[in-house]
Each structure stands twice: as structure tokens, then as C-alpha cells.
Image: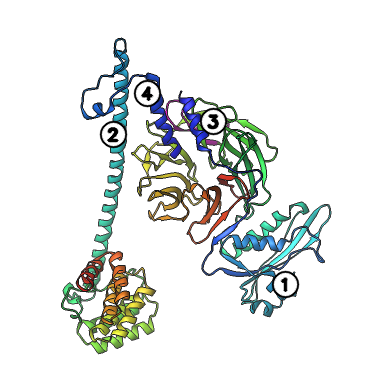
Amino acid sequence: MRNLKAILLIFVFGQACAEAPVVDIEDQSSGGQPARASGGQGSGSAQQVGVDMYYQVQMLQEEVRELRGLVEEQAHEIRQLKQRQMDDYRDLDRRLSALIKEGGAPASGAALPESADNGRPEPAARPVPAPREASDSDAERQSYAAAYDLLKDRKVEQATTAFRNHLKNFPDGQYAANAHYWLGEIHLLQNELESARQSFATVVNQFPAHRKAADAMFKLGKVLHLQGEDDRARQMLQKAVDAGGTAAELARAYLRDNFQ
Amino acid sequence: MLQACLKGIFLGWVLVAALAHAQLTIEITQGVDDPTVIAVPPIDLRGGGLDTDLGSIVAADLERSGLFAPVARGNMLSFPSNLGEIHYRDWRILGTEYLVVGEASRIGEGRIKVDFALVAVPGERTVLNQSVQGRASDLRGIAHYISDKVYEAITGIRGVFSTRLAYITVTPAPGGEMTYRLMVSDADGARERMLLKSNEPLLSPTWSPDGRELAYVSFETGRPAIFRQRLADASREQVTAFRGLNGAPAWSPDGRRLALVLSKDGNPEIYTLDLVTGEFTRVTRHFAIDTEPNWTPDGRSLVFTSDRGGSPQIYRIDLGSRDIERITFRGNYNARPRLAPDGRTLVMVHRDNGQFHIASLDLKTEDFRILSRTSLDESPTVAPNGAMVLYATKRNGKGVLAAVSIDAGVKFFLPTREGDVREPAWSPFL
């Protein structure tokens, strides 16, 4: 392709050589009126029109190619945006119906108890993740929901035990990452920084693709900062920023407020 | 004028070169983090006597895949050649996961038979136990067959050790000329064989789907023309001789047609040629450059490079409906598309920060990856099992072949001793 590009240039050049007259391209591209050739006097005028036409067609083709490229790219972007919107809608729908099924707790009720930092909205304050498929184990879902309900009711000690039991029973379950995450939140709340660090690190390292991973990165960064490990904290927060989403915003704000 | 310009371009394009005969060797630069440890003791006649030790070829094949780490011969405590002779303890202490044993025997008139077995050492389980026969003059072929079976039994992916490569070498000749050779070798670069030698450029070799023929572009008539040539008897036939470009041939999956690029009507357009009737069909019609066609595995569409959108990008055209759809959107240079056999993974040359890399695009998920870490990469070709991509690149100013696995985990070079190598084409399964 690289070579062909060069050929095209030569092709244009070749045509120009064959036709001989010199044309002021500068002038032509800026105004609508074709410029007169400096050397093509007398009999050359018909030929000159041909050359002018040739250049105009060239310019039009160039323009059409650029426009075509733009249209193609924008059509692609629109298709992607539509798809994303549909995915977001499905995700929201899934979560809402899960909430309704669980007894109609209002969405705001799912928020985590205020944690150690000064009331900044938590990225973790999201509704309970719903089971992905109907075939999911009910026992697992119930066990997790029960633990989560305890946390919502601020029965922190009991919630801790319940999450631990959940992890013992379903170490590789679909809520394992969530359970680790909430344990981290609880430890953070109780200022048990080392335990919090371990819980968040588990989410980050063992469930890198999980929805909670970015949130856990932010929290882990925060814990590391509280533990005085500024370098690692900054790295982890930067990872959260790179991961995107709500956590990225929080991580960016945290970096700005604490590291600069 | 145009003709002269074109010729100048092509001559200028094939500028760099080195010297004479050039056998490919292999240097692995990156394997998987945790390769499978496999041991292949010598496979020979009882009491020795074969010219080539089959076990060492098998071990080298497996190592080159990047997925295996063969146990060094010097560390082996015993050389079993059948299941009964295996002392598992010997292999367990070496951390061996798999062991290949085998023994050859003569079965008359220049033929040999090899009984071989693959065992999983930890479970002392026999995975394979079979035999293969072949000509005594084709020991490498027999060894590659064993490698294929072992590779497939362990990875679940069909092996490509028995397939072949075609490529062009360029070496300077006396008097400042260049000598171009169309070469064919085993997939490991061994048994290199020359199919054609020319003082004018040779380009774009491509395999017929039955692996018996190559089509390529030769300038021997003074301008580019497409030829097809049989491997068995080297007989050849000129397929096109149009004014202007005749380039980038690609054989259809059913072997009936060639897709190619002709500029006979003004600028490069894609055509198909029915090899039975000799009929040409124009596929693209655009004032931009359309080139580098490659067939989808179902034979119903072509992917190709076009700069109709202002920069080189990859498009797909349905040969029935003539619908054209752009399929690459990342960056402003994506060219030379090649589809993997699954029809889903597209491999291409992608420009990133001014460097040319080999990249892959999953057509379903739109997952895009840059596979190669070298720059100035070109001419990717996908192995028939879809696991590796071979391409041409530059190293220390020399044209060499390099390979990368489709998951980018394994990388190796196939350097030559002399000269430049370019335009590789991986054969289909043979």
C-alpha cells in the first residue's frame, strides 16, 4: 500500500508532465476561478481548460475521499454509541428488577454506611448486583443478600461474619469479589487498615475483570495512602483513573487533593 | 510515462539486499511464561543408523512453538525407546510433564516405520501410542508428523510442523544487479528449495488451497505479470499480462478463482479471474486505490485495502451483492489484511506512532491488539491452524522473517545467513 500511494503521486505527476503547462496550484485552491497558466499562451487555451478541469477533478476526488472517511468513521461511532446505550439500558433494567425482587428496598437504601472519609459519595454505593442468570444458585444469592442486608442495617460485626461465611461456602462464587470488597469497606470503616488492604487487594488481583475491580483499586489506593505508602498509593490510584468509570473520577479527585 | 514511472518505483522499492544462498534458521525471542516440560529421547533404529535423529527434530519443532521446553539430552538419565523401557522416576525428578518415546524399523525398499508414544509423566498415562511409515529419505517429514500428533494431543490445536513456507529472497549479483529467488521450505526453514530465479523482481507468492501450486508476480517480461507454478514439476503458466499493475494474487478457498489487482482501466482495482474459463470480473470500481485482496473462508467475500476514505483502511466486499463495508477504524493506516482460518480474526499491518506493526482485530468483539514489537513490519501470513502469524520485518537493516503467536505470547525470528527475505506465505495443511 505504501508503494501504491507513491505510485498515485507519480501518476498525478506523470499526467502533469505529459501536459506540460505550469499551473499555479496555490492560486487555484484558494479561489474559485482557475488560474491562468504562465506558459500556456496562444493555442494552449483549450489544453489549459483541460488541465484546469483535471486539477479540479483531482481536488474533488480528494475532498470526496476525506468526506467519505469522515462519514464512515461517524457511522461507526454512532453504531457503537447505540450499542453502548442498549447495553447500559439492559444493565439498569437488570439491576432494577433484581432490587424489586429482593423486597423493594429503595435504591438509596443500598448505600453503604458512611465510611471513614469525609462523606464523599462512594463509588461502591451501588445497588446489589443481580444474579446474571436464572440458573444461578439460589443458596449463594440468598447467603450474599443476607450478609448485605446486615451491612445495610449497620450490624457491622454480624455482617463481617456473614460475608466471611459466604466466602467460606462460595469461595469462587459470583459474589466472591463483592464479598471481599464489602469486607474491605468494613475494615476501612473500623480503621483496620491492614485487613482492608488485603480485602481490596484480593478484589484487584483475583478479580481484575470484575465490575468492582476499579472501585477496589481506588479504595486500595486510599488505604495505601492512609498506611503512608505514598508511592504505591499513587500507582494504584493512577490504575483506578486508567480503568475509567465513577471510580476514576474519585481517584482523580483523591490524587488531586492528596498528592499535589 | 506512467509505465516508466511505475517501473522506477518498483525497482526503487526493492533496493536493499545482501548475498547468495540463504537457509532460514530460527531464534526464539519470547515463549510462554510457563512452557510445558517435555522430553524427547533419541528416536532411531535399534542400535542407531539413521542419518537424522528424529527425536531431536521433534524436540526442536515443539520448542519452536514456544509452548514447550524440551529437556536437554545431557540431563536425561535414560533413553527409553518404548513404553516398557520407561522408568517414570527418572523423568519425575527432571520435572518432565510429557515424554515422547519412539523407535524406527526398516520395512524394506527404502521405507521405515516409527512406533511412537506420548505419555503424561505425573499420571503415568499413555496419551498416544501409534506408528507412522514413510520413505527413509523423508525422515524430517516423519519427524514433523510425530510433532504434529504430539502437539495436537497436548494443546488440542492441529500442528503445523508438516506445512511449508514460500518466500522471496533477494541477493546482490555481480554487476550491481539483484537476484530474486522464489523459495519453498519446511515450516522450520529446513529443506529449502528454489522454485524460480530471476534478475527481475518477484513478489507476492500465494498458495493454492491444495498446496500444490503457487501464484506470484514476476517482472521478467519487463513489467509485472502474474504466473502460476506447480511445485511438483516446476511447470508454470502466465496468467495475466495487462498494461500497468498486475499484482497481489490471492487464491479462492475452492481453488477455482484468483483475486488480483489490475490497473488496466486507469487505477488499481480488484478483479477476480476464473481459472477454468479465463474470465475476468471487475470487483471494485472507485477512483481510489483498491488492492491486497484476501478471501473470506466461505469464498463469498473479499477483504481488501482501499484509501477511498482518505487513508488506507480495510474493507470487505460481498461478491454477490457488491455491498462494501469498512472494517478498520483505529489509526490512519491499516493494510494488507489476512483472515485467519476461523474467518473471525483479521491480521493486518497497522501504523502506530509512525511504526508499522502487525495487529489483529476480532471481527466479532472488535477487540484490537498490536501483536509485534518490531517496527517496519509487513506482509503478514497466518498459519493454517490460526495459531501463528509469520511476517517480514527489518533487523539490523536486513530483511528477515519473524513470527508471533495470535495471542502475542510467543515470538521468534527466522533469520537467514545472507540476503534479504520477504513476502512470506504459509501453506495450507498439506
The answer to whether residue A146 is visible is: no
Residue A179 circle label: none
Mark 3 neighbour class, 10 Å CA radius: few under 14, some 14 to 19, many 20 or more: many
Q: CA distance from mark 2 to mark 4?
A: 20 Å
Q: CA distance from mark 4 to mark 3?
A: 24 Å
- The residue carrying mark 4 is A16
Q: Which residues are magenta?
A: B257-276
Chain containing the residue with disc 2:
A
> Who's the residue at 49% across and 52% down the image?
B342
Would residue A185 appear left or right of B261 to someone viewing this image?
A: left
Disc nearest the viewer among 4 and 3 = 4
> What is the three-letter code of the residue carrying label 3?
Pro
Chain containing the residue with disc 3:
B
Disc nearest the viewer among 3 and 1 = 3
Q: CA distance from mark 3 to mark 2?
A: 31 Å
**Residue A250 on image: x %, y %:** 22, 70
